[in-house]
Image (cartoon, grey):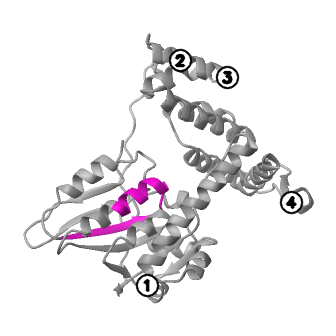
Amino acid sequence: MRPCFKFKAKAGDKPAVLAIDDEIGFWGTQAKDFRASLDAVEGNELIVDINSPGGEVMAGLGMFNMLRNWASAEDRTVTTRVTGIAASIASVIALAGDKRVMPKNAFAMVHQASGLAWGTAEELRDTADVLDKIDNSLKSIYIDRMGVDETKAAEIMAKDTWLTAEECLELGFATELSDAVQATAKFDVARAELPDHVAAVFTAKESAPEPEPVPAPEPEGAADPEPQLPDTPVAKQIADLAAEAKLGDFSAHFALSCETVEAAQARIKTALEITALCDLAKKPEFAAHAIKVGKDVAAVRTELLTALAEEDEAAPTSTVRTDESKGGATASSGLNPTALWNLHNAQAKKDAK
C-alpha cells in the first residue's frame, strides 16, 4: 500500500520532519507504520508539513491522537506547517501542532463528516447516528485546539468552510503566518474539487515537460487470469456469502483478500454499495474492476463523477434542467455530476422514509 506520509529523520540541529502530501487513508490506514515512525523520532521537536485534501476520518483521527500523545512527553513540541492546503480531516491533523504555521497564501477547509449509506431504513438511521457522533468528536477538537466556542465550531462545520491564512490566524487555527510560497500537490488537484482561488496555489512553475515513457506493447492473451477460490473452510463460507449477495463472480477475490468471514462481510457490503452507485450513474461497467481491486465507495464515486463530467464536456449541446418538485434533475443526453448527486440524495431520502 502506498503510504500518505513520509518521515525524514533528525539531521544535526535540524528536527525530524513528517510530510503529509497526499490523500489520507485511501491507500491503507497505515496506523502501525505511522506509530513505528513516530517512535523512531529522535530529539524533542517534530515538524509536520501538511498539503492534503483530507481523506478517511478514522485514519486522520489516529494520526492526530498519536501526534498529541507524542507531544505529551516532557519537553516535546510538535510544529505543524500547512504548506498548501489542510482540508477536511487534514485540518484536524494540522491542529495537533503546539505551534501552527501557515504561509499567507495557504488554506484550510473545515466541514462535517460524510459517507454513503446503503441498506434498510434502520441501517441508514444508524449511519446518520454514527456521523453525528463523529461530528461531535471533530467539533470538540476544533473547540479545544482553536479556542472557539461550540457555536462557532458548529458554524464552520455546517458547510464546506474555506479559510484563508489570515482567517485561520484570527480563528486560532494558525498561531502564526509566514511568507507566501509556491505549493505543489502530490494528490490529484482536479479530484479534490478545489475552488479556483485555492487550486491556483498549486499551479506548477513553468518548466519543460518531461517526455512521457512509451509503454511496451502487451502480448496477445496476456490478460491476468481470474484467481481460484482457496480450498479452505473460511473461503467456502465467504463464497456462500458472496453467492447470497449475488456477487458470486467475486468469491475468489473476497476470499483471497480477507482473512476472516467478518472482513469479507464488510467487503461484500462495500461491493453492494459500489454496484448500486454504478447502476445509479448508469455505468455498471465501473463496478467489476472496482470490486476486484478493493476500491472503497468514495474512490468509485469520484471516478464516476469525473467520467460524467468528461462526458458533459464532450457533449456541449446537452442540457440539464432541474425540477425541484421532483427533487432531482434530468438531462437530455444523460446524467451529469449534479444530476447524479440529486438522484442519489432523492433515493436516500426515499429509502429513509
Question: Residue 82: x, y in percent?
Answer: 37, 73
The amino acid sitting under disc 1 is Gly
- Structural distance between the alpha carbons of marks 2 and 4: 48 Å
Q: Earlier in the sequence, mark 3 or mark 2?
A: 2
Asked whether the residues under the numbered discs 4 and 1 touch, taking CB atoms below 8 Å apart as contact, a structural biologist would say no
Residue tagged 3: 246
Tag 2 residue: 237
Which comes before the other along the chain, label 1 or label 2? 1
Q: Amino acid at mark 4?
A: Arg
**Residue holding disc 1:** 172
Contact, CB < 8 Å: mark 3 with mark 2?
Answer: no
Asked which secondary structure carries label 3, the reply is loop
Say few, some or many: other residues with alpha carbon within 10 Å of mark 3 (under 14 / 14 to 19 / 20 or more). Answer: few
Q: Are marks 1 and 2 in contact (CB under 8 Å)?
A: no
Q: Quadrant of the N terminus?
A: top left
Q: Is residue 151 above or below residue 340?
A: below
3D distance between C-alphas at marks 3 and 1? 51 Å
User: Crowding near pointer 2: few (<14 within 10 Å), some, many (20+)?
Assistant: some
Q: Is residue 148 above or below residue 252?
A: below
Res 321 label? 4
Q: Earlier in the sequence, mark 3 or mark 1?
A: 1
Report the front residue among 45 and 312: 45
- Region rendered in magenta: 45-65
Report the amino acid beneath label 3: Lys
- Residue 125 image offset from top left, x and y in percent: 70, 50
Report whether residue 238 is seen. Answer: yes
Q: Is residue 51 within the magenta segment? A: yes
Q: CA distance from mark 3 to mark 2?
A: 14 Å
